Amino acid sequence: MGKFSDYELLSVIGKGSAGIVYKALHIKQNKIYAIKEVKMADDLSKEHWQYCLREVEIMKSVHHENII
């Protein structure tokens, strides 16, 4: 699937209007994480932008060892 920084993207866990969640392996730690890529395209409506920004704020408040 590809790489993102020190992570190898293994598979897609889920997909929605706000983005994609990947199962990823941290190469150096040899540990599995979930990585969410938030869709932030220039052509999104104002409402969708606000939704995405809310999603980012929610994700920042989640504290779990397997979510980065």
Image: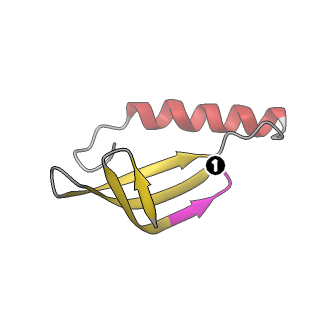
Farthest left residue in view: 29
Q: What secondary structure do most residues of the magenta stretch adopt? A: strand
Q: Is residue 10 left or right of residue 47?
A: left
Q: Is residue 59 magenta?
A: no
Q: Residue placed at 55% from the left, 57% from the top?
A: 20
The amino acid type found where label 1 is placed reads Ala
The C terminus - image quarter: top left
Q: Which residues are magenta?
A: 14-18
Q: Position of residue 57 (x, y in %)?
A: 51, 29
Q: Residue placed at 73% from the left, 41% from the top?
A: 41
Is residue 7 or residue 53 the one in the foreground? Answer: 7
Q: Which residue is mark 1?
A: 18
Q: Is residue 38 above or below residue 30?
A: above
Q: Residue placed at 48% from the left, 57% from the top?
A: 21
Q: Is residue 46 left or right of residue 12?
A: right
Q: Position of residue 22 (x, y in %)?
A: 44, 60
Crowdedness near tag 1: few (<14), some (14–19) or many (≥20) residues, C-alpha within 10 Å = some
Q: Position of residue 61 (x, y in %)?
A: 39, 31
